Amino acid sequence: MKYDVIVVGAGPAGSTAAKCLAEKGIKVALIDKKKFPRDKPCGGGLPTRVLKRFPYTVDLIDSISYGSITYSSSLRYKFKIMRDKPLIATILRKHFDNGLVKIALAKGVDFLENKTVKDIKIEDGKAAVIFDDGTQLESHIIIGADGVRSIIADKANLAKKTDDICLCILEEQQMSEKQLDKLFSDKRVVHIFIKTRGISGYGWVFPKKNYLNIGIGEFETGNNGTKPKTNLKEVFDKYIEILKNKKILPKNFTIKNLQGGTLPIFPLQKTYSDRILLCGDAAGFINPITGEGIYYAMVSGEIAANISAKALENGDASEKVLSEYQKIWQNDFGKDLKILGKFNKHWKQDTEKIVRRLTKDKTLAKLIIGVTGGQISVSRYELLLYIRYIYVTIKEFITRDRID
C-alpha cells in the first residue's frame, strides 16, 4: 500500500482529517480536483466554537463581528444584539482553506492537487481511488470529504437523490477598511434579513476586514410546490436595492463577482461503508437553519481520523468497525442537527411574529442568535428556548389584551 488513508477533498473536513491522521504517524494522501489556493462560494461566517475546538485556526481568521441586526420580512421589525465578546468570526475561504491545507502539509500529508477522482474500488484488504486519466491510488481506507456532489458517496452507494437543498447566490468584493468602518463600525456589525423578498430563507451582509460578503439563500424545503420557482438573481438585485435604501450599502455599489452554490440540508442516513467514511458536505453535515457547515466539517474530519486510526491499528476497516463513526458524530453534533432540522420547516411559515417577539425580549433574542450562530448547542438549550418563547408569547397576549 502506498498510503494508509486517502482523503478526497481538501476543504475544512478533508484537511482536518488529513492533519489529524498525519499527527498519529499515519501515511495519508489528500486529494483535490482544484489547484490551491482556490476560492469557494461561501458567506464566510464562522461560529466562534470553531476557534475554541480548533485553536490553530485563529491565525486564519479575517475579522471578528461583535454585533448583528436582524430584520423581519416586512422590514417593520428589527432587533439588535451587541456584545463585548465576539459574536461570529469571518473568513475568506480562499485564505482559510489554503491555510488548513498548509497546516496539514506541515504535519507530513502528501497533497495531490488538480487530480479528479472519478471512481473507487473496494476489494479484500484494500481500497483504491481511480482518477480521470485512468491511474489509481491504493490505501486501506478512503475518507470522502468532496462536497455536496460527492463522488465517493455516490460510488459507495451512500448518496441519496433529494430536493432537500439550499440554493444561494452571493457577492464578495474588496472595500477599503475606512469605508467598512463607516458602514459597519469597527464592531463589523452583521445584518440578517429574514425571508427577504418572500424567499424561504434569508439574506446576509458580512463585513470583513477589507471585504464585504452579501448573499441570499433559499431552502427548497420551504417551497412545498405551492409557489413558482424563485428567480434568485431577481431577488438578489432587489435585495441590493433594499440594502442601498437602508444605507447599508453605498448608492454606487455594483455587482462584480456574483457566485452561486448548493448546500445539503440533512445528513445522509448512512455515512460509512466498507473502507469508506464521509465527512462535511459529502455527509450532509450542515446547519439546516443557517446553512453553516465549517464547524461540522472540521469536527467530522477529526472524528473520521480517530476512527480510521483505530481501524488501522486493529487491522479491520470493515463496515461493522467503521460504523462507530456514525455513533460518535451523532452523539457529538447529531442531536443539534436533528433538532435544527425540525425548525427548518418554519421557513414555510410567516416568521413576522417570531421576529416581533424577539424585539420584545432580549433574552430570547440572545438565545436564538446563540443557537443559530453556532455559539451554543441547541440540544442543551432546547427546553429553555421553548419555555422562553412561550413566556414571551403569553406576555405579548396579556399586554395586547390590556391595551384593547
Image (cartoon, rainbow, N blue to C red):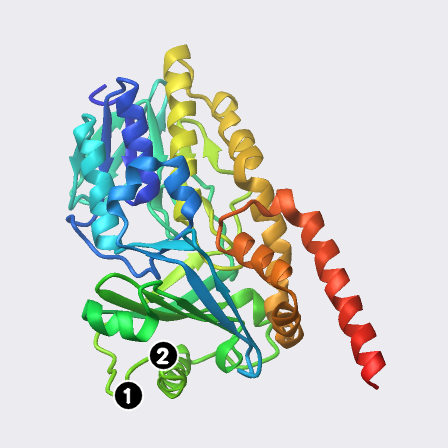
Tell me if mark 1 has few (under 14), some (14-19) or many (20+) residues whose alpha carbon lies within 10 angstroms of its own.
few
Residue found at the very far front of the displayed protein: 84
Q: Foreground residue, 378 or 32? A: 378
Circles 2 and 1 in contact, beta carbons < 8 Å: no
Quarter occupied by the C terminus? bottom right
| Residue on which the image places disc 1 | 251
The quarter of the displayed image where residue 24 is located: top left
| Residue on which the image places disc 2 | 248
Q: Foreground residue, 34 or 377? A: 377
How far from the left and from the top, in percent, is residue 231? 42, 80
Tell me the SS state at disc 2.
Answer: loop
Amino acid type of disc 1? Lys
Residue 295 vertical placement versus 248 (above, below): above
Tell me if mark 2 has few (under 14), some (14-19) or many (20+) residues whose alpha carbon lies within 10 angstroms of its own.
some
Question: Going by the image, does 114 lie left or right of 386?
Answer: left
Amino acid type of disc 2? Ile
Q: Foreground residue, 143 or 345? A: 345
